[in-house]
Structure formats: structure tokens, C-alpha cells
Image (cartoon, rainbow, N blue to C red):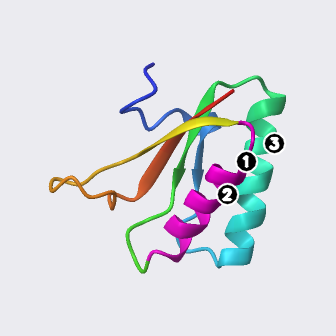
Amino acid sequence: MGFAASWGDAETVLNIRGKRAHEAEKAIEKFLDSLVYRGKKGGTIRHGKSGGTLKALARKMLKEDPRIDNELWARDETGRSSAGAVSFRLL
């Protein structure tokens, strides 16, 4: 399964849609730890398309985490990164 366009499997996808920011932050931390522990090469965080709070949180956490090699933001038909998910590769 390729990194770029893949939504991943159930083990490598975290859905934070509908969560409050503090709940999402804890879920992302636990998810990243779990991926590293299980030796996964990357994952996807589904943050949804609404107000952007969860998207901003996911972006900030992935940029600040030293285990993240790169990230790929899903794009909508206009090319904007608002398609509701981000995939990433771990070092």
C-alpha cells in the first residue's frame, strides 16, 4: 500500500472528527506512540473539514514531533488542503 493517496488500514488511521481539542491532542499522542511501538511506517489522521481547529492541532503536533519524516495533506478538487485528512511517514 502506497503512502501518498492511501487512507491506510484500521491500525494506521485515527479519526478525531467531533472531538474537543484536548481529547484530540491526547488521542494523537497515543496514536503516534502506538504506531512507533508497533513498527508502522506511517499513518493517517482524519480531522474533518469544519472550523479548522482539529486540522491546526494535527498540523502543529506533526510538525513538532521529531518522529515524523514528512506529512501529506489531502487536497480537495481546487488543490486546497481542506479534504479532511493528513497522512504522514515516520522516521
> What segment is highlighted magenta in the picture?
52-67
Query: How far apart are the alpha carbons under marks 1 and 2?
Result: 6 Å
Q: Report the front residue among 30 and 55.
A: 55
Which of the marked residues, 3 or 1, is nearer the chain's N terminus?
3
* Residue 59 figure quarter: bottom right
Across and down, in percent, residue 40 comes to 69, 25
Look at the picture and state if 51 lies above or below 73. below
Marks 3 and 1: CB-CB under 8 Å? no
- Point out the image quarter for the C terminus: top right
Identify which residue is drawn at 68% across, 67% down.
Answer: 24
Q: Is residue 71 left or right of residue 4?
A: right
Decide whether residue 71 is among the magenta residues: no
The reply to whether callout 3 and callout 2 are in contact (CB within 8 Å) is no
Residue position marked by numbered label 2 in the rendering: 61
Q: Does 22 sit left or right of 85 as displayed? A: right
Does dot 1 land on a helix, a strand or a loop? loop
Whole-percent x and y of residue 63?
62, 51
Give the residue type at disc 3. Asp
Residue at screen point 63% across, 51% down: 62
Query: Mark 2 and mark 1 in contact (Cβ < 8 Å)?
Result: yes
Between 64 and 72, the one nearer to me in the picture: 64
Instruction: Indicate yes or no whether the magenta region holds residue 63.
Output: yes
Position of residue 46 in the picture relative to residue 84 (left or right): right
Q: Nearer the viewer, mark 3 or mark 1?
A: 1
Name the secondary structure under disc 3: helix
> Label 3, on which residue?
33
| Residue density around tag 1, few if under 14, some if 14–19, many if 20 or more, within 10 Å | few
